[in-house]
Amino acid sequence: MAEHISIEAVSKTYLGGSQALRDVSLDAEAGTFLVLLGPSGSGKTTLLRCLAGIERVTSGRIAIGGRTVADSRAHVPPDQRDLSMVFQDYALWPHLMAADNVAFALRRRKMPRAQARERTAAMLDRVGLGALGERYPNELSGGEQQRVALARALVADTGLILCDEPLSNLDADLRERMRLEISSLVREAGATTVYITHDQAEAFALADRVGILEKGRLVQLGTPEEIYTRPATPFVARFTGLSGEFPVLIRRIIGDGLFEVEPSGATQGRPFHARGSDEPPGGPDGLLMIRPTGVRLVSNTSGEHHLAGIVADVAFRGRGYEHAIDIPGHGRLTGVFADTRADRGENVGLRLDPAGCHVFTGSHAGAGAAGNGAAGNGAASPAG
């Protein structure tokens, strides 16, 4: 049965004073596929290890299925938390064949040998390895080893599965195939899943809910759609895929979370609309962050454009062309899509869609401008 997870104000401080987690709180309903997303050092692996019982929390509380498994006084060891893990490096026993690696989880539960053999064979068939059960890990490819690790996690039929960047060691094509397999198999099993990654495209493709961590803090929790269309901070916007960013002047508040803005500084452009907080901006300055879905290439003579720029580069992507556009005084926008190719050095227009343009004000705007200055942070877009 899938387990409900509750994490309440969890902090983790290592010897020497390094704080890996800072008052992290979240709930995951039973059966949820939760992805924890963040860069290296954000605390996502530490949080997963605390949930697994590999690390002790410094303060706060973790409950699995309503049972407290960790707080400042108590610590339930990993083997008593009734969970399964899929590791980045597979963590298979090298001296055991694939079938024995899978069956190991059942032997720990003292399942009768004949029943364990039958269940192991069925699980290997389910992950497409029915004919490879008698091979050792070093006789299997990386994708096959990861399937064995996934089968081992699923065969135990626990209510909680933890995945520690299980696809990061695979090549791009195999990662996509394994992502689909993990998604379908885990959801078929009905378990609650907590999955960590630094890859935003992977997170958005897998998750029911995404939690984004920055420097040990949970800075936003929501559906992939909420994270992408309503990023809570400039960090969230950058980490989940930008075409670029630059400072703007706020002309007026339209309402319903929309501002009318125009480029500040030397850039020439027409006013346009961008999404922002319903709170008063507290000043005329803002930081505009543009998703690749929020900018479109148009003619600079048609009157449709809000900005003008010069094509710095162009790449064919099968469905069309992605352009890098230099905007005088404000750097570069990347991933600007068009059905037709614009030539390098060509003067072009850019039309901005408020659904993909987010303006941050106040302290967020100041920190962003100081930290990133120019447009184009090079982040990949989950939406392509």
Image (cartoon, rainbow, N blue to C red):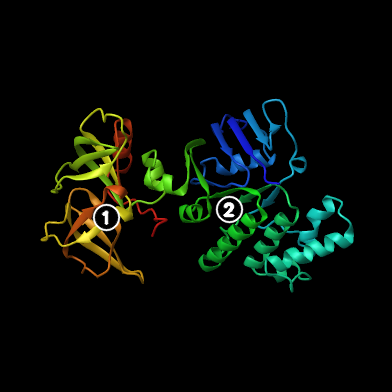
Camera-side residue: 273 or 55?
Answer: 273
Residue 190 against residue 56 in the figure, above or below = below
Residue at the far top: name it.
73
- Disc 1 versus disc 2: nearer the observer: 1
| Label 2 crowd bin: few (<14), some (14–19), many (20+), radius 10 Å | some
Instruction: Count all numbered tags in the image, as a single digit.
Output: 2
Q: Position of residue 149 (x, y in %)?
A: 69, 59
* Residue position marked by numbered label 2 in the rendering: 165
| Label 1 crowd bin: few (<14), some (14–19), many (20+), radius 10 Å | many
Amino acid type indicated by mark 1: Val
Which residue is drawn at the image coordinates 62% and 51% (left, top)? 163
Q: Reading the chain from its start, which is encountered first: label 1 or label 2?
A: 2
Residue 109 against residue 115 in the figure, above or below = above
Q: Position of residue 94 (x, y in %)?
A: 76, 62
Q: Which SS class for mark 1?
A: strand
Amino acid type indicated by mark 2: Glu
In what quadrant of the picture does the C terminus appear? bottom left
Which residue is drawn at the image coordinates 11% and 57% (left, top)? 303
Q: Which SS class for mark 2?
A: loop
- Quadrant for residue 309, please give it: bottom left
As drawn, is 35 to the left or to the right of 107?
Answer: left
Which residue is drawn at the image coordinates 71% and 71% (left, top)? 139
Mark 1 to mark 2 CA distance (whole Å):
32 Å
Q: Position of residue 129 (x, y in %)?
A: 70, 70
* Residue position marked by numbered label 1 in the rendering: 295
As drawn, is 127 to the left or to the right of 242?
Answer: right
As drawn, is 92 to the left or to the right of 177?
Answer: right
- Quadrant for residue 339, please give it: bottom left
- Please give the label number shown on residue 49: none
